[in-house]
Image (spheres, rainbow, N blue to C red):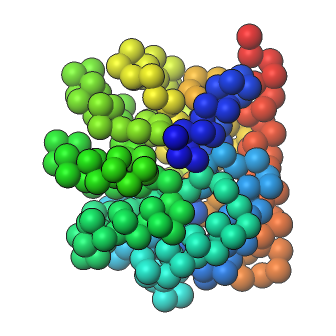
């Protein structure tokens, strides 16, 4: 087991739900990314998703697109994101997943990127634009490295395709709970419960539900339907609001802690 699998096994044994938090690496700079990772670990985050900045992030809404641009503006590259992961590993064993577009891996070299990520201390990679039908070499390389290839399931995914997707995955399945791009929402999708049940019919992997969770109340509601929740844009938005100010780390970590506390309420009250 790697850190992702260990964390989800611990959550299951303790009867708790998980919190996955996304941020853009290098927003506003890589030292802030390192500090946020350490603060999130203390605030109750179970898995950290690090988005590697890309110039054409098609799956992302405006909030995360702006974060990617800020990361590019700060000089963030795949190489120095790997260096940042090594720096995080000196102080924390928080599970880390790279959230990335395939072009970056292709340019770097797929096998080299996977090898370097594993050696740096990355636990999984989620490629947003790699269909599972084209992922055989990637999945084999990932499993050989000990990392988890994480795949997406959408609300429009039919059952037969869910079965094809989940057989390639390890660690957890990321259920994208609404159509479209990432972004904060005022209401959660009505179909989460039904779709998570459909996915669970096809796999024993934990289901992490994301896209649109914006506050502790929504986190609490969605946590009752999945094994974990994923919160990205609401966190990234706060990073953008505070920028490089001294209050950014404590303010954003405080929000993350409020999400963690909300889902723990679900866990305590669940049978």
In the image, taking residue 6 as reference, residue 40 lies left or right, namely right
For this orientation, the residue located farthest to the left is 134
Residue 38: name its quadrant.
bottom right
Q: Position of residue 60 (x, y in %)?
A: 41, 59
In the image, taking residue 8 as reference, residue 65 lies left or right, namely left
In the image, taking residue 76 as reference, residue 262 lies left or right, namely right
In the image, taking residue 262 as reference, residue 72 lies left or right, namely left
Residue 86 visible from this viewpoint:
yes
In the rendered image of this protein, does residue 248 appear above or below residue 51? below
Q: Position of residue 26 (x, y in %)?
A: 56, 78
Q: How many marks?
A: 0
Residue 255 visible from this viewpoint:
no
Q: Residue at x 60, y 35 (%)?
A: 8
Q: Residue at x 37, y 66 (%)?
A: 115
Q: Position of residue 22 (x, y in %)?
A: 57, 56
In the picture, the quarter occupied by the C terminus is: top right
Q: Position of residue 250 (x, y in %)?
A: 83, 66
């Amino acid at each position: 087991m790697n850190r992702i699998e260990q964390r989800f096994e611990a959550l299951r044994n303790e009867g708790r739900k998980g919190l996955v938090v996304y941020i853009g690496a290098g927003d506003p700079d890589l030292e802030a990314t390192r500090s946020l990772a350490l603060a999130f670990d203390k605030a109750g985050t179970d898995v950290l998703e690090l988005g590697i900045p890309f110039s054409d992030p098609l799956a992302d809404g405006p909030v995360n697109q702006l974060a990617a641009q800020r990361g590019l503006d700060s000089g963030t590259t795949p190489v120095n994101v790997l260096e940042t992961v090594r720096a995080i590993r000196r102080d924390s064993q928080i599970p880390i997943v790279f959230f990335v577009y395939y072009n970056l891996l292709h340019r770097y070299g797929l096998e080299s990127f996977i090898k370097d990520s594993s050696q740096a201390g990355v636990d999984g990679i989620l490629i947003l634009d790699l269909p599972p039908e084209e992922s055989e070499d990637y999945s084999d390389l990932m499993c050989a490295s000990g990392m988890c290839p994480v795949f997406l399931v959408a609300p429009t995914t039919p059952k037969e395709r869910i079965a094809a997707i989940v057989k390639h995955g390890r660690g957890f399945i990321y259920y994208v709970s609404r159509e479209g791009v990432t972004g904060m929402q005022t209401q959660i999708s009505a179909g989460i419960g039904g779709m998570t049940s459909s996915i669970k019919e096809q796999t024993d992997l934990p289901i992490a539900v994301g896209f649109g969770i914006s506050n502790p109340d929504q986190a609490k509601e969605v946590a009752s339907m999945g094994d974990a929740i994923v919160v990205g844009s609401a966190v990234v938005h706060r990073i953008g609001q505070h920028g490089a100010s001294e209050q950014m780390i404590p303010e954003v970590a405080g929000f993350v802690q409020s999400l963690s506390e909300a889902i723990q309420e679900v866990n305590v009250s669940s049978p």
